[in-house]
Amino acid sequence: MSDKTMMLNLKIWRQRTNKHKGEMVDYKLDGVSPDMSFLEMIDMLNEKLIRDGDDPIAFDHDCREGICGMCSLMIDGQAHGPQALTTTCQLHMRHYNDGDTIVVEPFRAKAFPVVKDLMVDRSAFDRVIQAGGYNSIAVGNAPDANAIPISKENADLAMDAAACIGCGACVASCPNASAMLFASAKISQFALLPQGQKEAARRASSMVASMDIEGFGNCTNHAECEASCPKGINLSNIARMNREYFKAKFTNNEA
Amino acid sequence: MTKLDSKIPEGPVEKKWQNAKFNYKLVNPANKRKYNVIVVGTGLAGGAAAATLAELGYNVLNFCIQDSPRRAHSIAAQGGINAAKNYPNDGDSIWRLFYDTVKGGDFRSREANVYRLAEVSNNIIDQCVAQGVPFARDYGGYLANRSFGGAQVSRTFYAKGQTGQQLLLGAYSSLMRQVDKGKVKMYTRREILDIVIVDGKARGVISRNLVTGEIEKFEAHAVILATGGYGNVYFLSTNAMASNGGAAWKAYKKGACFANPCFTQIHPTCIPVHGENQSKLTLMSESLRNDGRVWVPKAKGDKRHPTEIPEDERDYYLERVYPSFGNLAPRDVSSRQAKYRVDEGKGVGSTGVAVYLDFADAIKRDGRDAIEARYGNLFEMYERITGENPYKIPMRIYPAVHYTMGGLWVDYNLQSTVDGLFVLGEANFSDHGANRLGASALMQGLADGYFVIPYTLGNYLASHKFDKIETNHPEFEKAYQDAQGLTKKLLSIKGQRTVDTFHKALGQIMWEYVGMSRNKAGLEKAIKEIQQLRKEFWEDVNVPGDPNIVNTELEKAARVADFLELGELMARDALNREESCGGHFRDEYQTEDGEAKRNDQDFCHVAAWEFTGVDKEPVRHTEALDFPNVPLATRSYK
């Protein structure tokens, strides 16, 4: 807890709609408490803008506890800002100093068009999941939950992969705007579990194809995705996805 | 006058659901594709319902407020989901889960609904595992369980501290499969502005496209609301920023009764408020109370660092007051005890409005690694927010608004008092009575979505004849014009105060007078103050911008307008319920040692309110509650 407040110089991307041209706009904000979250700082700026008769800045956010994946923002060129393993909503202003200049932009990728200001359209991720990120199990069919034991090791690895929040930081950080960390996390979750085996080949082929259709780039091993991922999704998932993909192609075992 | 017919099926409680399912009319598989069903919400209840109804063959129109159905606020649930599997062999059963839930709800829920919930709980775990939900497992490969408040068995299944996320992503994956098949049409970034009723039946919705601002009309044979709770009426809560009461409130204004609106859950373990610019509160999972010990200094105003306060100068008050449940006492009683300590001047931290949750003993007993394995992500979250390391310094926690047990009244079939308008999950009132036990919200959401609505909706559709209607029907046109009018009105006021200032002012009234403890004078004052604030809102709110593009202030303004009416109804309900039960604590009705004192003689009922007009007194209907299976008793955790 600190009583000291700070003054910040903010440079923020403003863009009225997808059809308008955007630009960086400078704002000065005084009285920022170190206990505030980054988004609370923008809330404060927005209250000021409304009082001054300006249009508040649009940005995506919802749970504000780091799990919904709605918040985004490139902060000084880093997806979700400077703190590792942290979403923008969980980044707190105690990491900044009085007088700092902070540059805030939307997540940028061909597959993530800007909606307004800092908001982008990430529906491409939903379409990648639609291509195969599920087990085809209708309600009513399931056997007893303990009928198939799963090794703790695999269950834990599956959980680590399943922790992805679908925020898109991986895409925004990648020089190729690749979605491979995202897709591989889902493919890995199922590849590690016995429940996922029946559809493994179809899943890998179809999700990989879907990434191309949506306009995501390829992986060239920069590992920026892993560095920026707020949930620590491991790069080895991409290797597992590639194995699943080759297996599917070589065995020609597509449903 | 609306009559409340709960439609509880015949037979002993353990046969009711079986009997109901057999007696329900069925829709022939080939005919299901002739029905359109609107599902509002994509959380555990909505997402599960949309996916399951599509699997059966209905055409589903599914609406979500976020940019993707994967982000619904169910995702934030941390600790777990209950089921009566009895895998740990510790004496659990469907009957015990039923019993604990009825008792935990302080005898203000409907027995038949709660029994059904316990009955399908095991199917939920089976379904989720089959979907690929990575629940925690033991080394033998079988599922692990942990304990939660209000139970003496370990029946909670979990996926690290992200159980809600994993269950939601399971439902989302089933939903995406149906979107891919074309059986679900998904409408993202949409907010529901009205429910359309034609000839007494819910037949559609009016929505706003939050990207283009377009107001849209959608027609269907039935409407399902799974829109969550209204905790954000308090401004600060653990709810997500977009969680709102709008769709439920519009349904109320169209004739759906609102039941027990004053039953609010204040969760005992949240990170305390830090300052005026705070936008929301963050929960620390109840599971932490398995190993954490709650305490305050015995002396008032003791400002020493917690590690410098010796053992015999600490009051582990939950262990002292409730020796058999200890730190796992249920949420309502734990919250109240924290408030008592703060009121006594024993609160900790710079604000004095917090208590400690201490892991030192657990770390000494099991080692830091074991504690990290259990709660690592929660400890990290705490440190990110507060800047303090909970492995070294006890967490500071305080109660915060978390869940609303009240909601739209529904019968056994989950249908509201409007034909064809069904309400699932937190948005309805039915299963948790006056207090919800931990790990039961996820259970209820999925029970309603996967296992209840697929049967009850079919029965409704097969029992009614439907005229073919189009969205140019006069009722659609009227609702459309009303929605347009509201938008124009909000934008034209151009007053001096921002939407948030009104929301914060409402939140302060609600927390002060309709919060953890309530009394007659305070509630009467709250009603007057809310009415005054509502008047000021409509005269002085400033909603800037354009209605035809993204306009987040316009969205917020419409939600706050609803909260300004809903808050008054909550206060009115609290004022009329002259007893204390579960989360509803009236200062006037308590035992000598400060526990809730129920009045079963006069208040063993559901209060369901019927709308009669804004600024008019609503009508209070009652549904009597019977407890033939779990006899009424004073709830004791001592």
Image (tube, rainbow, N blue to C red):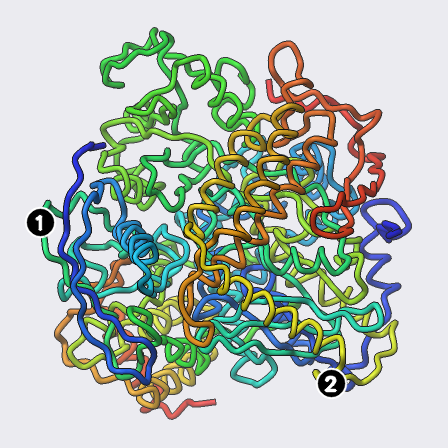
B589 is higher (above) or lower (below) than B581: above
| Mark 1, secondary structure of its residue | loop
**Picture coordinates of residue B216, whole percent (x, y):** 59, 78
Locate residue B262: give its quadrant.
top right
User: The disc numbered 1 marks a residue on which chain?
Assistant: A
| Mark 2, secondary structure of its residue | loop
| A233 and A10: which is toward the camera | A10
**Picture coordinates of residue B39, whole percent (x, y):** 63, 69
**Picture coordinates of residue A76, whole percent (x, y):** 13, 62
Q: Which residue is drawn at 29% across and 87% down?
A: A215
Mark 2, residue position: B470
Badge 1 density bin: few <14, some 14–19, many ≥20, Cα 10 Å: some
Eye-nearest disc, 2 or 1:
1
- B229 to the left or right of B319: right
Type of amino acid under label 2: Glu
Mark 1, residue position: A99
Residue A136 visible in this rendered orientation of the protein: yes
Type of amino acid under label 1: Gly
Locate residue B381: give its quadrant.
top left
